[in-house]
């Protein structure tokens, strides 16, 4: 099947050449883990039709958190952001599917939960910007960097859900 999993993104034969199967890095932050929201968040991605290819519970070290948020190092909230990410377990995930990077961001909602539509994850489950329950890569290039930062290659599982033909035409 053209949408069967593969290591490097490549054009889908059955779809326009501009469509590529892509992967994103999504993380359930320590606030959501402590609040018992892991299942709720994973369920939204499963029900959308995206394929889980990486999943683990991680207690991030400070260097991992600093590297993950390196682009925000000049921001005043950077130290507290890094400290927060290290404050408890994080569920690190890699999701795969058509347009998953952009769509996952839409499913998350705005960075500030009070600005998020209530139908989004942040809009439904969060209030403060520093406790916005979930992360997802903001671009395909960022996703590649973040997947490589959080996962070893052998931790990403190649598999073809039997449901694919009922999700993609
Ligand atoms: P996003 O997570 O939506 O991609 P950013 O990359 O801009 O947003 O910021 C990373 C994280 O830093 C946010 O998810 C949020 O938890 C935190 N953050 C962003 N802006 C602020 C702010 N003004 N004050 C406190 N924390 C912030």
Image (spheres, rainbow, N blue to C red):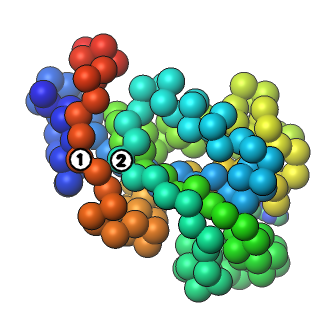
Q: Does dot 1 land on a helix, a strand or a loop?
A: loop
Quadrant position of the C terminus in the picture: top left
Label 2 belongs to which residue?
53
Q: Position of residue 125 (x, y in %)?
A: 79, 38
Q: Is residue 33 left or right of residue 106?
A: right
Q: Is mark 2 within 8 Å of ligand 1?
A: no
Identified at 61% across, 74% down, the residue is 60
Asked if residue 134 is positioned above or below residue 42 in the image, the reply reads below
Ligand 1: which quarter? bottom right
* Classed neighbour count for the residue bearing mark 2: other residues with Cα under 10 Å, few (<14), some (14–19), many (≥20): some
Q: Is residue 117 left or right of residue 168?
A: right
Are the residues at dot 2 and dot 1 in contact (C-beta closer than 8 Å)? yes
Identified at 66% across, 34% down, the residue is 40
Label 1 belongs to which residue?
158
Q: Is residue 142 left or right of residue 66?
A: left
Asked if residue 10 is positioned above or below residue 39 in the image, the reply reads below
* Mark pair 2, 1: CA separation: 7 Å
Quadrant position of the N terminus in the picture: top left
Q: Which of the pair 21/92 is nearer the observer?
A: 92
Q: Position of residue 59 (x, y in %)?
A: 62, 71
């Amino acid at each position: 099947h053209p949408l069967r999993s593969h290591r490097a993104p490549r054009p889908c034969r059955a779809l326009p050449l501009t469509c590529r199967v892509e992967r994103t890095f999504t993380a359930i932050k320590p606030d959501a883990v402590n609040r018992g929201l892991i299942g709720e968040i994973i369920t939204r991605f499963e029900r959308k039709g995206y394929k889980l290819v990486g999943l683990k519970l991680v207690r991030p070290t400070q260097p991992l958190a600093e590297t993950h948020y390196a682009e925000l190092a000049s921001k005043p909230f950077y130290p507290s952001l890094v400290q927060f990410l290290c404050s408890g377990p994080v569920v690190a995930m890699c999701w795969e599917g058509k347009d998953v990077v952009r769509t996952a961001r839409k499913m998350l909602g705005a960075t500030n939960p009070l600005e998020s539509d209530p139908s989004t994850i942040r809009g439904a489950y969060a209030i403060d910007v520093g406790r916005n329950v979930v992360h997802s890569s903001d671009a395909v290039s960022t996703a590649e960097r973040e997947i490589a930062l959080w996962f070893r290659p052998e931790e990403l599982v190649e598999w073809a859900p039997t449901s694919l033909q009922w999700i993609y035409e």
